Amino acid sequence: MRTVITQGIILTRVDYGEADRIVTYITPDNGKLHLMAKGARKIKSRLAGGIELFSLSDISFAPGRKELGTLVSARLREHYPSITHDIERVQQGYALLKLLNRLTEDDTEEQYFELIRTTLQSLDVPDIPLLLTDLWFRARMLTFLGHQPNLISDAEGVRLDAGSSYDFDIEHMSFRRRPDGSDNLSAGQIKAMRLLFSRNSPSQLHRVTGLEGQLADLEPPVRLMSAHYLS
Amino acid sequence: MKNSDVLLIEPDAELASTYRRALEDDGHNVRVAHSAQSALHLADEHQPDVVVLELQLTDHSGIEFLYEFRTYQDWQTVPVVVHSIVPERVFQTSRLVFRQELNIHTYCYKPTTSLRQLRATVHALKV
């Protein structure tokens, strides 16, 4: 039996029969894998320790003829215990794992694996605000899926002005100058949004002075984009 | 009507004892687990009709238990009564998703839920 060795983070687990589970992993080099974990429902299964959520495992599997392979072994490599000690973080973790699973195909690229790994690492740090990790995750997903907003020029093509306020135009994924609008975003907030959509991780963004104070203002447009393009 | 098999998941031994006695007085068969893992083991041994769940557990949280619990076909429709020190407003942004996705029948906030109310809630689910 040929076996393949890789790393994986579990996205979902479902019951299969009386004793088995089907586990979906996201991996750096094999996309998403759907693997049968035989006997995983039993308490003393040798696989039980390696199929926990919110963890990165070294896994070996036997590829199947069709889409379902067989999990041979799983050994915990990184666990993120702080997530499980905080109910809100657990709930958020589940929500983001589910979102990633829904929005990705089986032959997904390594960037999605790195995205969820960084997300779990961030959720595991109690000092990093949950909202920061959540908005950052959504911003990265929007970018990967080709829905990054225009953060350079407004809807008219004019470079964003440091002295102006703007509203966010979801149709054009850009900003419109609307000085007397009710949903104004200042140049400072747009700058904060640029940071959010940058390649910086939540732990790096956490160190940016003043960014976390802007999150409440950034949340509505990011949630709007998320509702449009990530649902 | 058969007595309901209640799986009570409560980390505090004294509270668990109080709730168990009250529910048994109402005619239910009650099995008590103090952790998420032991709750799964008990559910595996004795199919519950109702689950009463504290979310603030010592090891894995009640949320984790619920997500794991609902991945098993046998347990997807078992009514769950959350009876917790965690207020539901904690799940503000995802409350509807939280309830629907995890099929939570009733959410009882412990400080404002009397024992009589808890008993009435469980009794209303008697199968």
Image (cartoon, rainbow, N blue to C red):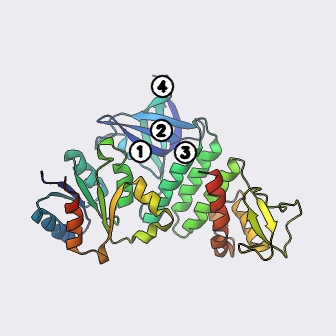
Q: Which residue is mark 3?
A: A102
Compared with B46, A192 (above or below) is: below
Identify the residue shown where x is 24% and y is 49%: B43
Q: Quadrant of residue A72?
A: top left
Find numbered disc 2 in the image and state the secondary structure of the residue it sits on: strand
Does residue A172 appear left or right of residue A158 in this picture?
left
Q: Quadrant of residue A50?
A: top left
Q: Which mark is residue A50?
A: 1
Question: Looking at the picture, which amino acid does disc 3 mark?
Answer: Arg
Q: Which residue is mark 4?
A: A64
Q: Tell me if label 4 and label 3 are in contact, CB under 8 Å.
A: no
The residues tagged by marks 4 and 3 sit, at their Cα atoms, a distance apart of 22 Å
Is label 2 on the same chain as label 3? yes
Compared with B117, A136 (above or below) is: above
Camera-nearest residue between B12 and B95: B95
Q: Tell me if mark 4 has few (under 14), some (14-19) or many (20+) residues whose alpha carbon lies within 10 angstroms of its own.
A: few
Camera-nearest residue between A159 and A184: A184
Numbered disc in front, either 1 or 3: 3
The residues tagged by marks 2 and 3 sit, at their Cα atoms, a distance apart of 22 Å
Does any portion of residue A141 appear in the rendered image? yes
Identify the residue shown where x is 61% and y is 46%: A112
Task: Check the residue under mark 4 and report the chain it is in.
Answer: A
Find numbered disc 4 in the image and state the secondary structure of the residue it sits on: loop
Q: Which mark is residue A59?
A: 2
Residue B71 screen position, x and y as percent: 37, 45
